Image: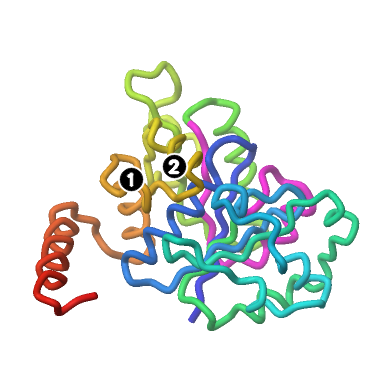
């Protein structure tokens, strides 16, 4: 059974797309068949983050009825499957929301976990995509305006019968004068399921057009995404187990038992 998980935020710039992409890679590395769909149909970012632009087929072509969903599915160097949306301005003029249901129906059974990178805010366009999710993760930063908007997003998700799994607190700095994790959790009345630290590695990974989990897998932020992914599938992330598996794989490769 396919799980549709919306990654949503009340405002832009909180790291929603980077969360979607890195969560997808982390799930793939855990053996889950995962896919990231760019559900931000007006200002899509997934393709830009991964360096896959000017594509022959995008989600917009599927919504137009011109292509199948398989034609719009690509595999990044990290192994992550993605369905990008069209970044061109002309795509806005031919945007067709009427076939969204057929798109999501067609995706059922194609992957174990499909992450929907929703647009920011609570516009009609955003909600029209989010409502096809079964579950949602809400991304925010530890600042009052972002948290306030996250609260609205939680309420909107629940009104659409979407189970809010929890909150991902992104861009967290040490010794900051912003809201504490405890205060954010209390205000939103949802568990903090991921705490992603602010890091220069993220900027470097974005510049290289690669997910952080793939490009800097040993960074603290990458480990935080791996922990988030483990929690999403009911596992407990243990760093020493990952290192042991990596060493074991290296030995197998040297022995010619693994490619």
- Compared with 251, 214 (above or below) is above
Name the colouring of the figure: rainbow
Secondary structure state at the residue bearing disc 2: helix
Classify mark 1: residues with Cα within 10 Å, few (<14), some (14-19) or many (20+).
Answer: some
Q: Which segment did they paint magenta?
A: 118-141
- Compared with 142, 190 (above or below) is below
Provide residue 180's location: percent of width, then percent of height.
39, 27
Report the side of 160 relative to 200 (left or right): right
The structure residue drawn at horizontal position 38% and vertical position 63%, both measured from the top left corner, is 27
Asked if residue 129 is among those painted magenta in the image, a careful observer would answer: yes
Report the side of 74 relative to 228 (left or right): right
> Is disc 2 in contact with disc 1, using a CB cutoff of under 8 Å?
yes
The structure residue drawn at horizontal position 59% and vertical position 50%, both measured from the top left corner, is 8
Provide residue 61's location: percent of width, then percent of height.
78, 69
Asked if residue 28 is among those painted magenta in the image, a careful observer would answer: no
Classify mark 2: residues with Cα within 10 Å, few (<14), some (14-19) or many (20+).
Answer: some
Q: Quadrant of the C terminus?
A: bottom left
Mark on residue 154?
Answer: none
Provide residue 118's location: percent of width, then percent of height.
64, 53
Report the side of 64 relative to 26 (left or right): right
Mark on residue 205?
Answer: 2
Q: Nearer the viewer, residue 56 or 174?
A: 56
The structure residue drawn at horizontal position 56% and vertical position 48%, both measured from the top left corner, is 49
Mark on residue 216?
Answer: 1
CA separation in Å, label 2 and label 1:
8 Å
Provide residue 56's location: percent of width, then percent of height.
72, 67
Q: Quadrant of residue 175?
A: top left
- The earlier-in-sequence mark between 2 and 1 is 2
Q: For the view shown, which residue lies furthest in the right direction?
A: 93
């Amino acid at each position: 059974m396919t799980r549709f998980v919306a990654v949503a935020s009340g405002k832009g710039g909180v790291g929603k797309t980077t969360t979607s992409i890195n969560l997808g890679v982390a799930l793939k590395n855990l053996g889950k068949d995962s896919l990231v769909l760019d559900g931000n149909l007006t200002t899509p970012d997934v393709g830009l983050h991964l360096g896959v632009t000017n594509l022959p087929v995008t989600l917009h072509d599927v919504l137009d009825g011109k292509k199948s969903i398989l034609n719009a599915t690509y595999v990044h160097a990290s192994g992550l499957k993605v369905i990008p949306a069209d970044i061109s301005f002309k795509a806005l003029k031919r945007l067709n929301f009427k076939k969204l249901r057929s798109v999501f129906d067609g995706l059922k059974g194609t992957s174990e976990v499909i992450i929907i990178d929703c647009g920011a805010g609570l516009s009609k366009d955003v909600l029209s995509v989010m409502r096809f999710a079964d579950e949602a993760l809400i991304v925010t930063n530890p600042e009052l305006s972002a948290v306030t908007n996250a609260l609205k997003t939680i309420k909107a998700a629940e009104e659409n019968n979407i189970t809010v799994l929890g909150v991902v607190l992104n861009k967290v700095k040490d010794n900051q004068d912003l809201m504490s994790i405890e205060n954010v959790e209390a205000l939103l009345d949802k568990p903090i399921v991921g705490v992603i630290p602010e890091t220069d590695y993220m900027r470097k990974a974005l510049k290289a057009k690669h997910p952080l989990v793939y490009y800097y897998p040993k960074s603290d932020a990458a480990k935080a995404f791996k922990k988030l992914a483990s929690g999403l599938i009911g596992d407990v992330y243990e760093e020493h187990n990952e290192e042991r598996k990596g060493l074991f794989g290296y030995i197998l490769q040297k022995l010619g038992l693994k490619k």
